[in-house]
Image (cartoon, grey):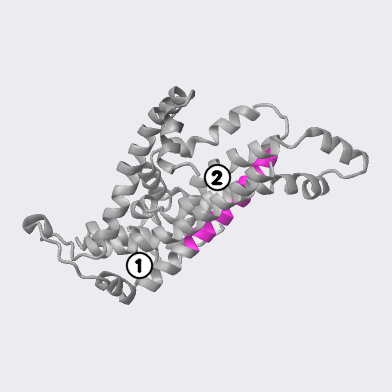
Amino acid sequence: MQHPRRTRLAWWRGPSAGNRLAFTAFLAPAVVYVLAYFAYPAIQNVIMSFQDYSATTFFTGEAPWVGLQNYRDVFGSPIFGTTVLNTLLFTAGSIVGQFVIGLLLAIFFSRRFPLNSVLRALLLLPWLIPLISSSSIWRWMLDPESGVINYVLLQLHMISTPIPWLTSPSLALLAVVIVNVWLGIPFNVTILYGGIKEVPSELYEAAALDGATGVRAFRYITWPLLRPVVTIVLVLGVIYTLKVFDIIIGLTGGGPANSTQTLATNSYQLSFGQFLFGQGAAVSNILIVFSMLFAALYLFRTRRQADAA
């Protein structure tokens, strides 16, 4: 049996050694980038969650090790249950709204009609606007006194008094979900439209001969072939939505009465509002665990699709 070290040396000194060196040279920057910008911050965040890291640490340079105390404080916080529930409602509402509207628009744009490409390009505008600018615009639109939405609803006699979209604890989360749905529609339309266009047109022609058109064609041809794309869209959408915080901060700041407080905004406010960096890191680690579950699901699904191809 050949010694493992000799095997490795033979691998490097073989006839394809130049290719392997080039492979390593191209791979090294990506490895360094991942280690520097993802692995190191993630490890530091985990370490910080076990330390009493606060504003005094900046002056003393000391962050005593406190074990699981930060996690106990987070789980024992009176708003932790509310933040978890709001995170789930915000994510579920956003994903359902983005996907349903995105799929309907993708089906609509898959048909040929004048200005199709122009309208699809305009649909990408929400992506081009900085998120903090989008939140400012929507904050004005949803203002109960001067907002354009209440003005239109009043003019159409659909409401009798202005709706306090962002100041009512029972409506604020719904308003934030509506804004996030608006932001996520372009992503869903783009990916689903590409998936629909990949369906061979011959299948629709053959189905039409058997009388399967419209809804029946979608049910028996489009949807089965689109299902792998749908899975990817939903999983990536959940991962992205779980960590959304800039829109919520810009619209409500987590209020009123913590009605729009999510794990992401709670982590931000603990760290940079109350300077409890240890507890903020603990909350963000909980959020990372949620995201990693869906990331693992995404990798599992993509691997299965690659194996099946």
Q: Give the range drawn in magenta.
A: 89-108
Q: In which quarter of the image is residue 213?
A: top right
Numbered circle sitting on residue 125: none
Q: Residue at x 70, y 35 (%)?
A: 198
Instruction: Pick whichever, 26 or 263, lies toward us.
Output: 26
Q: Quadrant of residue 289?
A: bottom left
Q: Residue at x 34, y 74 (%)?
A: 75
Classify 215 as above or below 63. above
Instruction: Pick whichever, 259 or 85, lies toward us.
Output: 85
Give the residue pinned by disc 2. 185
User: Can residue 163 be seen in the rendering of this structure?
Assistant: no
Query: Does the magenta run of residues contain 176?
Result: no
Give the residue pinned by disc 1. 258
Q: In this view, does 110 lie to the left or right of 26?
A: right
Q: Which amino acid does label 1 sit on?
A: Asn
Residue 15: x percent and y percent?
Answer: 49, 23
Dot 2: few (<14), some (14–19), or many (≥20) neighbours within 10 Å? many
